Amino acid sequence: MEKWSVVRCPACRNCHGTRTRPRQCPHCGQTLASSTPIVATADSAAQLRIEVALANTPEEIRDELRKKLEATDEPLVAINSTSPRHLYSLIVKRAGESGIIHRNDVEDVLLKVESEMDADDLLDQLEINGTIIRRQDGTWQLLE
Ligand SMILES: [Zn+2]
């Protein structure tokens, strides 16, 4: 069975998922030692998303979030099957060289493909995957 790991970056304290041993933090670029502690493991990519989201959540609301995420396991998979790769490539195109994403860029992309997905849901999804990171000014930065 495939094993995924969730590791916490010692520099920025953000967690992300990795399939192999820790290499580099997608949030701040810190090179991670192979001794970086694994905070959780998962058997699937879907489970990994939940574990990463939980690991990045304050402990006091973690139980509540876990219930919510595990209850909505299906929608997570559904989002996956609406070709996130395609949506992501369109968003990358919109972002251009700056790699900065605005919420209305995402809305435009979703509108264009006639997706009923909510822009915030998609942004959350990409953020959980470690594909983008939220900036202080309310925009997002592409990491890949
Ligand atoms: Zn980091």
Image (cartoon, rainbow, N blue to C red):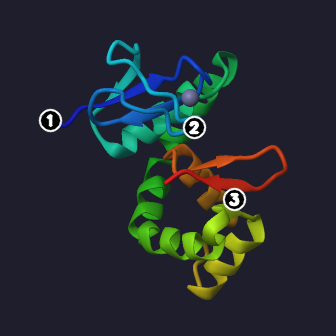
Hey, which quadrant is residue 116 in on the image?
Answer: bottom right
Q: Is mark 1 within 8 Å of ligand 1?
A: no
Number of the label disc, if any, that sits on residue 131: none
Q: Residues within 10 Å of mark 1 (few under 14, many from 20)?
A: few
Front label number (3 vs 2): 2
Viewer-closest of 14 and 107: 14
Q: Amino acid at mark 3?
A: Asp
Q: Secondary structure at mark 2?
A: loop
Q: Amino acid at mark 1?
A: Met
Q: Secondary structure at mark 1?
A: loop
Residue designated by label 1: 1
Q: Secondary structure at mark 3?
A: helix
- Point out the quarter of the image occupied by ligand 1: top right
Residue at position x 63%, y 79% from top?
109
Number of the label disc, if any, that sits on residue 120: 3
Residue lying at the far right in this picture: please name it: 137
Counting residues from the N terminus, which is met first, the one under dot 3 or under dot 1? 1
Residue designated by label 2: 27
